[in-house]
Image: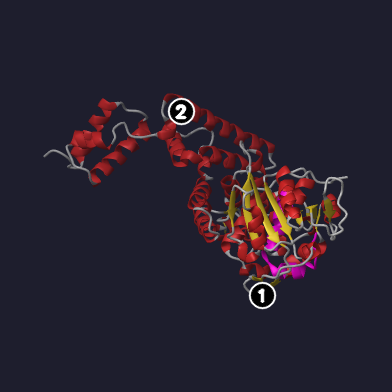
């Protein structure tokens, strides 16, 4: 009986390899995900054919071929919307300084599988092969599982084919990948894996920021990021990746509702995930995790014994920007996360609705396209166990939402601009382009924020008044 549903493209490819006397295996994450019922259009294969032979077999079959990984024995191709990567059996050794492998091709599927990261990724399905005496099922598929990956997957256990120390020494990024699989698949690392991660956490410093960021992003976007982050913190692996997160364990929540700010931040992350309208949102999740990272540096004990964190949002925004830049996140992600961290306390000035319409306009304008995420973050930041206080906060959130909706119905709230643009300002004041136009624009924008739409006639009168007071325009 077949355990894995095989994509037709895979069988097509296998037939070509078999005709040429080569064996082809579906392998790794492709097998794991198929067993979990997680279909995809990216398929990984391994074969006894060397790269030049693979390229020859793909000719005339694939719609596109790329050989950027050929130095490591990997050739990529695409056919009918399916991307395939085919790697010759590997039996690499590593220098364990730079993590660069000394590429060595293996002779058997067993050679290849033992060098893979985890047993759940060390399973293969032989699709078809040369006449080598292998016992294939009637469908031409043979399941290969020398390290008990299927049993581990069924038990929800994450372990390594070889010893974890050997596996992680070959590639320390595998430790971060272990946490990623905790988040993505809900697996639990074997005790020996956790022990090795703890003992070898410093080895992660050998890995480039780009590779670290790619794994961290997948971890954050998984269904169970809290569990994965707790594993990183407990093993010490978070220190070289996001040191600000374990540092939050030092700062006690001023409301004494959580044992520390770290735990509070993980709860906020979980609550933000519940408020995602369109699936995993990297910016919102990072902002939720990092929104209080400025607290350790701003923690003060007041004369009355209370703990305060004045301006932690300012400090936190700077720290978030610095850390995400170092992890090589795109500029848009860095800017948006930092802005959300900076703005996450702004709502608390709203109180029971004392804000003027001007203050509401400024709140919306400062948030810009991040407004929906800011609302999700602010609502998620309520983790108090005091039901009365939680209910009061929710009423305040609802009140602000209603105020914004009412103003939006009256005004173009999402794109607030002065009633006069730059060309109109130059015409009214009879001035050329230059700094004066920018100053006048800012003045009219401030009036627009304070008083709402003025109308063209009133705006021109205000502009002339400003110009007279500042000696601008016609003499």
Disc nearest the viewer among 1 and 2: 1
Q: Position of residue 451 (x, y in %)?
A: 36, 31
Residue at image position (50%, 45%) is: 343
Q: CA distance from mark 1 to mark 2?
A: 61 Å
Q: Is residue 111 left or right of residue 399?
A: right
- Residue placed under numbered mark 2 in the picture: 408
- Residue placed under numbered mark 1 in the picture: 95
Residue at image position (50%, 56%) is: 321
In the rendered view, would you say 359 is above or below 158? above
Q: Quadrant of the rendered structure where residue 465 is?
A: top left
Judge whether residue 204 can be spotted in this image: yes
Q: Is residue 356 left or right of residue 391?
A: left
Q: Between residues 140 and 380, which one lies in front from this camera angle?
A: 140
Q: Position of residue 306 (x, y in %)?
A: 60, 53
Q: Is residue 475 left or right of residue 145?
A: left
In the rendered view, would you say 456 is above or below 369? above
Q: Position of residue 315 (x, y in %)?
A: 51, 56
Q: Between residues 191 and 441, which one lies in front from this camera angle?
A: 191
Quarter of the C terminus within the rendering = top left
Q: Circle 1 sits in a helix, a strand or a loop, which is it?
A: loop
The stretch in magenta equals 159-184
In the rendered view, would you say 160 is above or below 304? below
Q: Position of residue 458 (x, y in %)?
A: 27, 27
In the rendered view, would you say 407 is above or below 69? above
Q: Quadrant of the rendered structure where residue 166 is?
A: bottom right
Residue at image position (56%, 47%) is: 283
Residue at image position (61%, 51%) is: 289
Judge whether residue 230 can be spotted in this image: no
Q: Earlier in the sequence, mark 1 or mark 2?
A: 1
Q: Main secondary structure of the magenta part?
A: helix
């Amino acid at each position: 009986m077949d355990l894995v549903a095989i994509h037709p493209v895979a069988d097509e490819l296998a037939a070509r390899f078999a005709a040429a006397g080569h064996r082809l295996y579906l392998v790794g994450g492709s097998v794991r995900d198929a067993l979990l019922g997680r279909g995809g259009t990216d398929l990984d294969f391994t074969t006894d054919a060397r790269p030049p032979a693979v390229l020859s077999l793909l000719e005339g079959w694939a719609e596109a071929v790329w050989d950027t990984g050929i130095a490591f024995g990997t050739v990529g191709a695409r056919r009918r919307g399916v991307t395939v990567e085919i790697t010759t059996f590997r039996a690499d050794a590593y220098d364990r300084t730079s993590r660069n492998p000394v590429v060595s091709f293996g002779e058997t599927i067993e050679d290849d599988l033992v060098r893979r990261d985890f047993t759940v990724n060390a399973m293969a399905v032989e699709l078809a092969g040369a006449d080598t005496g292998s016992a294939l099922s009637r469908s031409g598929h043979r399941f290969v599982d020398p390290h008990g990956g299927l049993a581990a997957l069924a038990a929800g256990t994450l372990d390594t084919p070889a010893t974890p120390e050997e596996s992680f020494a070959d590639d320390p990024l595998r430790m971060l990948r272990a946490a990623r699989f905790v988040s993505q698949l809900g697996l639990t690392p074997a005790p020996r894996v956790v022990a090795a991660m703890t003992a070898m956490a410093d080895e992660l410093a050998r890995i480039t920021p780009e590779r670290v960021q790619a794994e961290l992003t997948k971890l954050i976007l998984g269904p169970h990021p809290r569990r994965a982050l707790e594993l990183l913190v407990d093993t010490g692996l978070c220190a070289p990746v996001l040191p600000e997160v374990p540092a939050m364990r030092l700062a006690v929540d001023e409301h004494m509702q959580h044992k520390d700010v770290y735990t509070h931040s993980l709860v906020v992350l979980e609550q933000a995930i519940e408020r995602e309208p369109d699936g995993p949102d990297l910016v919102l999740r990072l902002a939720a995790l990092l929104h209080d990272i400025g607290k350790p540096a701003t923690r003060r004990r007041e004369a009355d014994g209370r703990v305060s964190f004045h301006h932690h949002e300012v400090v936190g925004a700077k720290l978030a920007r610095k850390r995400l830049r170092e992890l090589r996140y795109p500029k848009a992600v860095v800017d948006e996360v930092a802005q959300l961290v900076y703005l996450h306390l702004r709502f608390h000035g709203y109180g029971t609705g004392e804000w003027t319409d001007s203050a509401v306009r400024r709140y919306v304008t400062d948030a810009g396209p991040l407004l929906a995420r800011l609302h999700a973050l602010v609502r998620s930041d309520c983790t108090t166990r005091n039901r009365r206080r939680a209910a009061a906060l929710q009423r305040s959130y609802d009140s602000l939402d209603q105020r914004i909706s009412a103003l939006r119905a009256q005004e173009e709230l999402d794109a607030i601009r002065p009633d006069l643009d730059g060309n109109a300002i130059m015409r009214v004041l009879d001035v050329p382009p230059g700094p004066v136009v920018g100053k006048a624009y800012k003045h009219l924008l401030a009036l627009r924020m304070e008083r709402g739409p003025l109308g063209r006639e009133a705006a021109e009168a205000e502009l002339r008044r400003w110009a007279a007071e500042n000696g601008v325009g016609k003499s």
